[in-house]
Amino acid sequence: MKGIEMMDNFKLVTDSACELDDDLIKFFDAETVPFSMMLENVNYIDDDHLDVRNFVKAMKQSKHVPKSACPSPEAFAEKFRKAKNVFCTTISSHLSGCYNSAMLAKEMVEQEGGHRVHIFDSWSATAGEIAICIKIKECIEAHMDYDAVVEKVTEFRNGMRTFFILESLDNLIKNGRMNKIVGYVASAMSLRPIMTAPGGEIKLFEKARGSVRAFTRLVELIGECHKDFSDRTLVITHCNNERQASFIKAEAQKLYNFKDICVMPTRGLASMYADDGGVVIAF
């Protein structure tokens, strides 16, 4: 019964590096705390009003690299105060100061009393954050208490795998999100790099010659990570690349026994780093 009681005062908060579908929003009364992105002296807020396609188009037309700013602690605290039991997931602390901002908000709100907040450093972004949110939902549906949810989801996060293929690594490199030398080597010789993020740090996993081989190899890599996927959801996010996202979904349905496959378009921040055509998977 403890888990059922907890549901009455429960909330999920994410940053806008995470894409939430209607089911997650409704289940958790979930809310997103937006990043902001600056490009050509225009400040873009990564909320529901952002036209992501126009933002990506503006990036293509600009000679400048967009910059991002993470939400303030107070922006998180405002959401945390709305429930007694709060879970929050953020983009990897290796990629942004967002996790630290959320942790400061947690301290503020818990000192005020009447609230319990846990922040999950996703060690990922976009698809990885969604996968963690789905796992939290599954734990609550299993009537786990708060501490059990933290333990189970942390265990899942520790074993979660994230892979991605981007048309360009320039925004990641120029914003200091990955090593310049590794990034430029990964992009050299017209090879398509398959990237990963162990412990939340972006690394080159391997290179494939051409897009067809790269995305075929991405599907193969799923089967090299686990054998049984019956308790896992494959999450696929993409920036204007529904074709390759659909290919991954179709092939994964043929080859693996995922209990579900979720496909979502990226929001503003993930689109800024994934750039046009980028695809991210997590499971």
Image: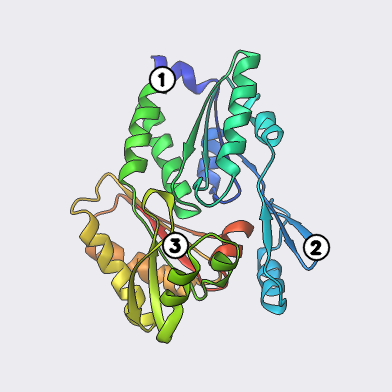
Of pointers 3 and 1, the one earlier in the residue sequence: 1
**Residue 48 in the image, given as x and y percentages of width and height:** 69, 52
Is residue 54 in sight in this rendering? yes
Separation (CA) of disc 3 from disc 2: 27 Å
- Crowding near the residue tagged with mark 1, few <14, some 14–19, many ≥20 C-alpha atoms within 10 Å: some
**Residue 238 in the image, given as x and y percentages of width and height:** 50, 65
Is 35 displayed left or right of 200 in the figure?
A: right
Give me the residue at 59% from left, 19% from top: 110
Give me the residue at 32% from left, 36% from top: 155
- Residue carrying label 2: 42
Give me the residue at 68% from left, 65% from top: 66
Q: Is residue 278 above or below residue 115?
A: below
Q: Nearer the viewer, residue 179 or 166?
A: 179
Separation (CA) of disc 1 from disc 2: 45 Å
Local SS, label 2: strand
- Crowding near the residue tagged with mark 2, few <14, some 14–19, many ≥20 C-alpha atoms within 10 Å: few
- Residue carrying label 3: 280
Q: Residue furthest bottom?
A: 189
Amino acid identity at mark 3: Val
Q: Is residue 127 above or below residue 167?
A: above
Q: Are marks 3 and 2 in contact (CB under 8 Å)?
A: no
Amino acid identity at mark 2: Val
**Residue 177 in the image, given as x and y percentages of width and height:** 53, 59
Q: Which mark is residue 3?
A: 1
Amino acid identity at mark 1: Gly
Is 177 displayed left or right of 195 in the figure?
A: right
Q: Viewer-nearest of labels 3 and 1?
A: 3
Q: Which mark is residue 250?
A: none
Q: Residue furthest right?
A: 41
